[in-house]
Image (cartoon, grey):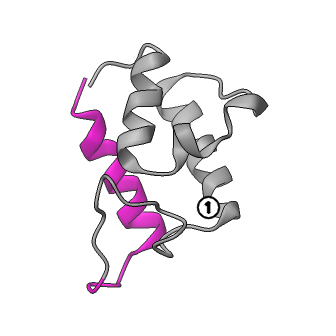
């Protein structure tokens, strides 16, 4: 499987910061606090993760510890059995 970090970061770049060259995706920085995503964006991200990696994200998993940063997303995907 291609690099999961590159896949997730690519989705974020294409869907949330396309055309904004002043914005960078730091894997350790909150995507919401940095203004890259809002709550609707989180739902778009979850839908993308479910379809791309064939996983199910339960309601109780929709927490910052799983989805706030790229690092958290990668750790969450590993816990779901997606290898990077």
**Location of mark 1 (residue):** 41
Specify the quadrant that holds the C terminus. Answer: top left
Residue 30 lies in what quarter of the image?
A: bottom left
Asked whether residue 4 is drawn in magenta, I would say: yes
Quadrant containing the N terminus is top left
In the displayed structure, 19 sits above or below 70; it is below
Residue closer to the observer: 31 or 54? 31
Q: Residues within 10 Å of mark 1 (few under 14, many from 20)?
A: some
Residue 45 in picture, x, y percent from top left:
56, 49
Q: Is residue 64 left or right of residue 36?
A: right
Instruction: Indicate the secondary structure of the residue bearing disc 1.
Output: helix
| Vertical comparison of 55 with 51: above or below | above
Magenta region, residue range: 1-22
The residue sitting at 41% across, 74% down in the picture is 17
Residue reaching furthest to the top = 81
Residue at position x 39%, y 19% in the image: 82
- Quadrant in the picture for residue 57: top right
Which of these two is toward me, 4 or 60? 60
Instruction: Left or right? Give the position of 24 relative to 82.
Output: left
Residue at the image point whose x is 30% and y is 34% from the top: 4
Q: Residue furthest right?
A: 59
């Amino acid at each position: 499987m291609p690099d999961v970090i590159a896949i997730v970061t690519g989705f974020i770049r294409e869907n949330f910061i396309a055309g904004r060259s002043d914005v960078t995706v730091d894997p350790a920085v909150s995507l919401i606090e940095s203004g890259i995503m809002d709550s609707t964006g989180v739902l778009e991200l979850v839908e993308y993760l479910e379809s791309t990696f064939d996983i199910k994200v339960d309601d109780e998993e929709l927490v910052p510890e799983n989805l706030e940063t790229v690092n958290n997303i990668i750790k969450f995907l590993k816990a779901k059995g997606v290898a990077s």
